[in-house]
Image (cartoon, grey):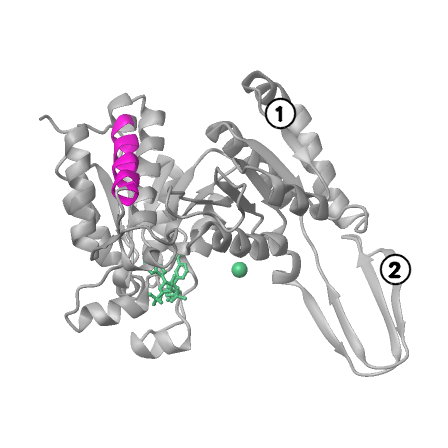
Amino acid sequence: MAKIKMKTPLVEMDGDEMTRIIWKMIKDELLFPFLELKTEYYDLGLMERERTKDQVTMDAALANKKYGVGVKCATITPNMQRVEEYNLSQMWKSPNGTIRAVLDGTVFRTPIIIDSIRPAVRNWKKPITIARHAYGDVYKDTEFRVPGPGRAELLFTDSQGQESFRQTVFDFEGPGVLQTLYNKDDSILSFARSCFEFALNTRQDLWFSTKDTISKQYDQTFKLLFQDIYEKEYKEKFDSLGLTYFYTLIDDAVARIIRSEGGFIWALKNYDGDVMSDMISTAFGSLAMMTSVLVSPYGQYEYEAAHGTVTRHYYRYLQGEETSTNPIATIFAWSGALRKRGEMDGLSDLVMFADALESSSLETLNDHIMTKDLVSLVTPGTEVKTVNTLPFIREIAKRLSSKL
Ligand code: NAP
Ligand code: MG
């Protein structure tokens, strides 16, 4: 059998710990045997980030911007404990943050659904994809613990130094708390474009919700900017594909989503998206079954698993133990990236390979061969064969080779 060829390289970003081990297994067992894999490789492992003073992350992000499609392994975001563990010269920033800043993108998270794991919400039949705006709001707020009586005011001074807005927020008669938020039109517009692009791309309806009835400037601005971009740039394309853009109040959205079948994208402001994405992923099953793609407003894509480096499993692996870590989300990061590369380069074989890789993975799970994390999630009474990561990947490879 001739191996499937690629044209433009994928930007490959290697990572840390257990997911780095799985990364190699996936390449060795599922990609190299079938594909003339062409990648531009960047090692975002923590040691290499330290050695290059994090330049490697910036280089990878720029390459992702240049070539259009990247695939990333989970990476450690250093905290104090990691600084000691790895003897770091600095607490390097989150690589995902750096990549997101370069691509100016929005993260879309989608659960991978199988027959034997029923979502907690009975009527959900198709995945619900969450799009979270990753800029501003409470994550960049200014807060103040009000010590006692006094006046809080909101003041805006324009670039000419003119005080153009001043309003009393509250006259405190005793201690309390104070918080201010901001956002930028530019960022909201990028968010909107990424959402509309991704909806067109995946042929799904787009929902967006805020609390604009209460927040008459802040949330209202989000609503109006989305509506404006939709009408000017996307309505025709949506109409021609039979897709809908649907805005509704967030409380109404929550009620509708619980009653829905799924199968759409739900765009949310930063905090709402933070909370709702955890709710949706838990209700669908597991973080180990959740993919994540960063989509820039200019049509660049970076695919990864939603979970982290699975540190606890890695320490067991280092003790010589074979672990039963779930590689599905990382496999789907590869298939997602390869499919997108195939679509961009007009390589139908590559698209077909990505489809086959996903269906082989799902068939393996639907044959009830799975990693340990999924066992407690399957419908009671299901007879399951629990396997470790490598044998699991080999089961997928077996099914894949019979398709190609
Ligand atoms: P995590 O790696 O997602 O793992 C948390 C726990 O979830 C694991 O201990 C495991 O539970 C379970 N789990 C997650 N993925 C799994 C999989 N594929 N198969 C089986 N079980 C899985 O989160 P974390 O422990 O909070 O973070 C570890 C490191 O990852 C941190 O250094 C963090 O900075 C980094 N991180 C990176 C990214 C990213 O690169 N996008 C995202 C999040 C976190 P059990 O131990 O109970 O089996
Ligand atoms: Mg959260």
N-terminal-most mark, 1 or 2: 2
In the picture, the quarter occupied by the C terminus is top left
Q: x and y percent of residue 277 in the render? A: 53, 52
Is residue 142 placed above or below 236 in the rendered structure?
below
Viewer-proximal residue among 16 and 323: 323
Q: Can you identify the residue that label 1 sits on?
A: 233
The magenta region covers 352-366
Q: From mark 1 to mark 2, how far is it between C-alphas?
A: 36 Å
Q: Quadrant of ligand 1?
A: bottom left
Q: Looking at the rendering, which quadrant does residue 161 occupy?
A: bottom right
Q: In terms of secondary structure, where does tag 2 sit? A: strand
Numbered badge on residue 166: 2
**Residue mark closest to the camera, 1 vs 2:** 1
Q: x and y percent of residue 98 in the render? A: 44, 54
In the picture, the quarter occupied by the N terminus is top left
Q: Is residue 361 one of those drawn in magenta?
A: yes
Residue type, label 2: Arg
Residue drawn at 30 percent across, 40 percent down:
362
For the question of whether residue 36 can be seen, the reply is no
Q: Looking at the rendering, which quadrant does residue 64 occupy?
A: top left
Q: Is residue 214 left or right of residue 115?
A: right
Residue type, label 1: Glu
